[in-house]
Image: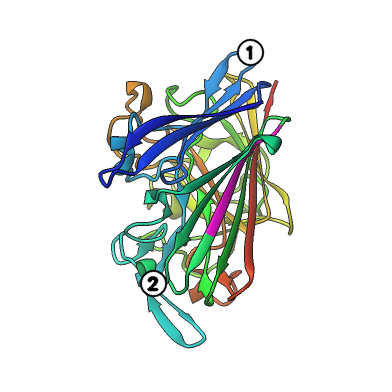
Amino acid sequence: MSISKKLYGTLPDGGEVYAYTIDNEKGVKLEFLNYGGIVTKLLVKNRNGEYTDVVLGRASLEEYLKNDGYIGAAIGRHANRIAKGEFEIDGVKYNVGINENSNSLHGGVVGFDRKLWEVTESEADNSVILTYSSPDGEEGFPGKLVTAMKYTVTDDNAFKIEYRALCDKDTVCNLTNHSYFNLSGHESGDVNDQILQINAGFYTPNDNEGMPTGEVLSVAGTPFDFRAPKPIGQDIDADFEQIQMFGGFDHNYAISGRGYRLAATAKSLETGITMQVYTNQPAMQLYTANALPAGVHKGEKEYGVHDAFCLETQVFPNAMAHSHYPAPLLKKGHTYKHVTEYRFITE
């Protein structure tokens, strides 16, 4: 097991960005930046014993500075969407940064994906801790929120993220990671033939701006049914309004059960790599890269539509507007705790 770092680049304000690598020397190597907590590489041994990079990425720091698709980034203070950037806590209305149509997406104009995080290394448990203190009122969110993310590569070939956050006022907190996965390799083209299973019997349909309507519908008899394993591309072009509106999947699933549990399993038949996603969160967004942003990507690869999938563990989007959704409310002095783990098995 080893942890190393190297200078990756310098921000316009002079801040130094480092690339950290955690290598368990058994089959998984993780590379990420202290800028935005961005996962730049995730190397997993395939069935031939060779490393496959299973996440999409950019070619340079300059490209990550204009990372419109949030590729690989940590997301906060609030993952996913808040309608009109508005919510109330105890009768007080808050307005947060608007950055997608008339709504707030992934933390607003300058979210956690564009922050330089402080880093503490711990070779004792194969982990690196990234911390960021978001001041009261940043992007309009109430309270000073101190966040820590612990990135660990385990001995049994898992990449684990443990989030903790504490605020000095009642606020909202909904953190996630926005890695784009392709288990055949980041440069291998579309993921339509990769197999996906999601432990969820219900999903939340969206309006035409990607905002949940408040309904929670059964997946039975719809393209959203991944309760049994099926190719991601099987229904990605289905004649179904919720699919046609977005050119694929970009929807929130209510994960079955409670506590720390299996949320999803994905597999590439080409490489033999299986990824299991475990989380303690109530929901997960499936996004099939329906609109990957242009730019220079690593390996000079030009990514296209459906060249990856995202499994973003989270609280329901816009939950403060729907009392029947699990709320992202974080009370003053309470600790936000979120764990998500990507376990890799090669067959």
* Image vertical order of residue 21 relative to residue 246, above or below: above
* Image vertical order of residue 276 relative to residue 206, above or below: above
Badge 2 marks a residue whose secondary structure is loop
* Image vertical order of residue 15 relative to residue 109, above or below: above
Q: What residue is disc 2 on?
A: 137
- In the image, is 296 to the left or to the right of 332? left
> In which quadrant is the C terminus drawn?
top right
What's under tag 2, amino acid-wise?
A: Gly
Residue 49 got which mark? 1
Disc 2, disc 1: CB below 8 Å? no
Q: Earlier in the sequence, mark 2 or mark 1?
A: 1
- In the image, is 37 to the left or to the right of 220? left
Prevalent SS, magenta region: strand
In percent of width and height, residue 318 lies at 47, 68
* Image vertical order of residue 235 relative to residue 78, above or below: above
Question: How crowded is the residue under tag 2: few (<14 C-alpha within 10 Å), some, or many (20+)?
Answer: some
Q: Name the residue rendered at 45%, 26% in the picture.
A: 186
Residue 153 among magenta residues: yes
In percent of width and height, residue 88 lies at 46, 81
What's under tag 1, amino acid-wise?
A: Gly
> In which quadrant is the N terminus drawn?
top right
**Magenta-drawn segment:** 147-154
- Foreground mark, 2 or 1? 2
